[in-house]
Image (cartoon, rainbow, N blue to C red):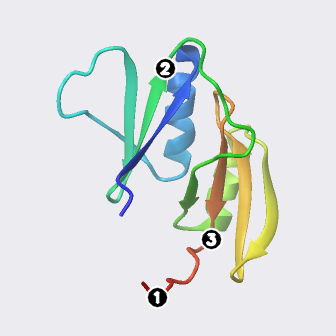
Amino acid sequence: MLHHVSIELPTEALEACTEFFALLGFRRVESPEPLGGSIVWVERAATQIHLIGTEGASVPALGHPAVVVEDFEATLERVRAAGHEAQESRELWGSRRAFAIAPGGHRVEMMEAPPPATEA
């Protein structure tokens, strides 16, 4: 199980990025102890994204978090209504997908459903 992913972004984009992830169903949570610096944790179910505001943040060209959203159509509408460009991509595993650029520049994939589980 993946617990969290950390994303570096410019400090000035931290609050807007927190609001972006709220559109995907994440809510802001407190870290277990003061960590210092510009860090925001957001969580949905048992998965967290740690947003780290830092000078000199870099954005990968293709690397991205992918989030299975509760209601794909409604989420896509919320993201677009908030002014973010979200483009649908080809379906995989019979499910819709879309990509948006979050404040700070990171690509985020929104998935209608996860892929089928594979045998271990």
- Please name whichever residue, 4 or 120, is drawn nearer the observer in this view of the structure: 120
Lateral position of residue 19 relative to residue 105, left or right: left
The percent position of residue 84, horizontal first and vertical second, equals: 73, 40
- Residue drawn at x 34%, y 59% is 45
Disc marking residue 112: 3
Cβ atoms at labels 2 and 1 below 8 Å apart: no
- Please name whichever residue, 2 or 120, is drawn nearer the observer in this view of the structure: 120
Mark 2 and mark 1: Cα distance apart in space: 38 Å
Q: Dividing the picture into quarters, in which one does residue 112 lie? A: bottom right
Mark 3 and mark 1: Cα distance apart in space: 22 Å
Q: Earlier in the sequence, mark 3 or mark 1?
A: 3
- Which is more foreground, mark 2 or mark 1? 1
Q: Which of marks 2 and 3 is nearer the N terminus?
A: 2
Q: Earlier in the sequence, mark 2 or mark 1?
A: 2
Judged from this view, the residue extending furthest toward the bottom is: 119
Quadrant of the drawing holding the N terminus: bottom left
Q: Counting other residues with Cα less than 10 Å from the Cα at mark 3, is it few (<14), some (14-19), or many (20 or more)? A: many
Judged from the image, the secondary structure of the residue bearing numbered disc 1 is: loop
Give the residue at mark 1: 119
Q: What residue type is labelled 3?
A: Glu
Q: Counting other residues with Cα less than 10 Å from the Cα at mark 2, is it few (<14), some (14-19), or many (20 or more)? A: many
Q: Which amino acid does label 1 sit on?
A: Glu
The percent position of residue 85, horizontal first and vertical second, equals: 78, 43
Give the residue at mark 2: 53
- Which is more foreground, mark 2 or mark 3? 2
Q: What residue type is labelled 2?
A: Gly
Judged from the image, the secondary structure of the residue bearing numbered disc 3 is: loop
- Residue drawn at x 77%, y 74% is 91
Q: Counting other residues with Cα less than 10 Å from the Cα at mark 1, is it few (<14), some (14-19), or many (20 or more)? A: few
